[in-house]
Amino acid sequence: MLAGIGPATLRKIASLQGFQLSDVESLGLQVPALARALASPLAWEIAKELAEKQVDLATTHQARIISALDPDYPHLLKATKDDPFLLFVKGSLFTAPSQSVAIIGTRQPTKHGELIARRVTEFFVEQNWSVVSGLALGCDGIAHKAALEARGHTVAVMAHGLQTVAPSQHRKLAEAILASGGALVSEYRFGQGALPMQFVKRDRTQAGLAQGVVMIQSDIKGGSLHASRAALDYERWLAVPFPTDADLAANEPKIQANLLIADSGADIERATLLKCHRSRLAKIIVLRTKEDYREMVSVTFDDNVVAEAGAAVDEDLSQTYGIRKREETEISLLITSEEVALDQDQLEVDASTQKTVDRDLLDHESSPEQARQVDKETSAPQAVTEVGVVEPASVPSKKSKAKSKKKAAPKSELTVQQSLL
């Protein structure tokens, strides 16, 4: 593929008048990153061959490749600031794109967490909403299964190419999702294995595909916090079930994030955990009883607003750039340019590495080293780089003078609150 060309550069190319009718050399004169990528004499020819292989692989795997220029690209995702330019899709996306929720959580939920994951999923299916999750073990898998059992629609967002399913324990679940009319979605090309940084981006994509995120359970360092932070970053709601007395009494580690997020008297600590401005905390919904579920479906983007926003983008592109149905050369340009947030030397993942990924990396919340790395990456302002990687902006680092102590929930809640969820 063309090294150094990702979503950011693709958008620059798409902003050029008549880009779909221009040859690649002309486009390179207007986009420096493309010119640099074409510096090698055979770079474009090799890229086109690789692009053709991607198209062939999509056909082989009964998948399709859509771009942000296509009418069936999800409008909720398009409304985010770091949406992937390309999506690889197997199966059927939403019939009502604005009615979708991301239900995510720890790989190791408590008994109450398992129960709530099922109940919340069943509630949204009853409302004819689509359920988005990440096909991981634990809460993700429970949400997908509950949606299928309730005859609902569900979408699994993958952190690798669609040539495989990871974790391997969920291959049959993935097949069931497709058989039921659901979809498997990835922003990563065929052949791409799972790498640590891809899980964080996958989690943000889950949030981008949904009106809001329900974080069933998580500890303070849980990987589920990535999607939760993204929801608030995208100005969407975040719902967290309040723990039961039994989980509180057992001091379960997988409820600690829920406990802190639900504490309205700890705004500084909550904003620190969620890495957001305190004003965004108003979008948090605490689920204490079943009656609270209704609030999640009442606080949504209006269908017309979402449709108009997507239509406005499409109309602007159409009027300015003369967008028509993509020709084969345009498809090649889009696919060959997509580096999907990876450095070139990371694109090859051998079989032994992939086995390690299957075993260890999928539970990204459980790795202390990865958690520290994620904290390091997300503690600084973020920016989208030329290859589409969400990375911290270049700012001087500062050592914290002291760690904030987590503020305990009011004693009355800890001792009296009996969850009716």
Image (cartoon, rainbow, N blue to C red):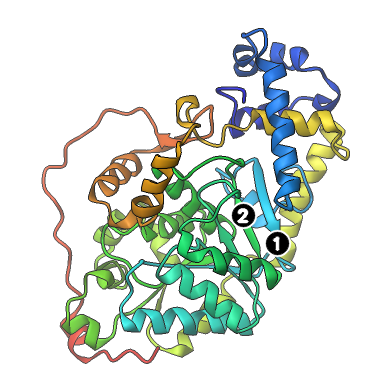
Look at the picture and state if 143 lies above or below 357: below
For disc 2, the marked residue is 185
Give the image location of residue 35, x and y in percent. Answer: 64, 12
The answer to whether residue 65 shows anywhere in this view is no
Q: Is 295 in front, or is 91?
A: 91
Relative image position of residue 385 (x, y in whole percent): 49, 30
Which residue sits at x=29%, y=66%? 257
Count of all numbered marks drawn on residues in the image: 2
Place residue 369 in its image quadrant.
top left
Q: Say whether residue 247 is left or right of residue 282.
A: left
Callouts 1 and 2 close, C-beta under 8 Å: yes
- From the image, which quarter does the N terminus lie in? top right
Measured from the top left, where is residue 188 in percent x and y? 57, 43
Tell me the distance, in whole angstroms, between the alpha carbons under discs 1 and 2: 9 Å
Q: Which mark is residue 93?
A: 1
Residue at 73% x, 24% y is 48
Q: Is residue 160 visible?
A: yes
